[in-house]
């Protein structure tokens, strides 16, 4: 009698394990996509709140992340953490590229000027009240050339040190 209960208990344990394992394997999580292996639907992550469900017949529809059948799962939480980390990394890369582009354009813009000429140009623009962006652009190049120290830039521009932005973009026509 006990062995019968033991066999039934073992059978139901395997059955329960198989059912729970089947559901877990139903959704395959890849970088920014989830595949429902049972229906063939693909859930594509569009942003932190929305996914697009692409059905096997080719139709698609937006769906909130919280209303997906796998919402709250550990795999989804891990996917969202990776998505946010990748997004932050991409933002930082784009910002670094933008800063490098601004510095390169500034370097090319003032390549014809010697350090002394560029300093004189800044003084002239500052006295004449030229646009702040133009003055800041020249000061940033002088700092880059190590003609002046970054800590002295605020004093030269007569502004608060918190307002210093060495990555300001200036696209004026007259240097």
Image (cartoon, rainbow, N blue to C red):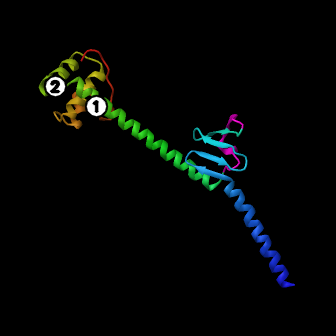
Dot 2 crowding, Cα within 10 Å, few <14, some 14–19, many 20+: some
- For the C terminus, the quadrant is top left
Label ID, residue 103: 1
In the image, what residue occupies the spot 33% across and 34% down? 99
Residue in view at x 82 percent, y 83 percent: 3
Q: Quadrant of residue 58?
A: top right
Q: 43 or 148: which is nearer to us?
A: 43
Q: Residue at point 70% right, 61% down?
A: 21
How many labels, in total?
2
Q: Where is residue 153 in the image (x, y as percent from the top left)?
A: 23, 32
Q: In the shown orientation, is residue 2 left or right of residue 25?
A: right
Can you tell which mark lies on residue 94?
none
Residue 24 lies in the magenta stretch? no
- Give the percent coordinates (x, y) of residue 65: 65, 43
Q: Name the residue under label 2.
A: 119
Q: Position of residue 2 (x, y in %)?
A: 84, 84
Which residues lie in the magenta part? Answer: 57-71
Quadrant for the N terminus, please.
Answer: bottom right
The relative height of residue 17 versus residue 72 in the rendered view (above or below) is: below
Determine whether, in the image, residue 95 is placed left or right of residue 40.
left
Residue that appears at 36% across and 35% down: 97
Q: Is residue 42 visible?
A: yes
Residue at the extreme front of the image, as rendered: 57
Is residue 76 visible from the viewing direction of this image?
A: no
């Amino acid at each position: 009698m006990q062995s019968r209960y033991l066999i039934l208990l073992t059978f139901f344990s395997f059955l329960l394990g198989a059912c729970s394992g089947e559901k877990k394997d139903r959704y395959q999580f890849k970088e920014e996509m989830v595949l429902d292996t049972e229906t063939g639907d693909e859930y594509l992550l569009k942003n932190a709140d929305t996914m697009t469900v692409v059905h096997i017949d080719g139709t698609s529809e937006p769906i909130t992340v919280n209303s997906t059948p796998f919402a709250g799962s550990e795999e989804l939480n891990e996917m969202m953490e990776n998505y946010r980390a990748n997004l932050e990394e991409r933002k930082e890369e784009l910002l670094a590229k933008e800063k490098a582009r601004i510095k390169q354009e500034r370097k090319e813009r003032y390549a014809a000027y010697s350090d002394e000429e560029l300093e004189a140009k800044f003084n002239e623009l500052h006295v004449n009240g030229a646009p702040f962006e133009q003055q800041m652009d020249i000061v940033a190049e002088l700092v880059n050339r190590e003609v002046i120290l970054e800590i002295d830039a605020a004093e030269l521009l007569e502004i608060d040190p918190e307002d210093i932005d060495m990555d300001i973009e200036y696209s004026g026509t007259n240097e």
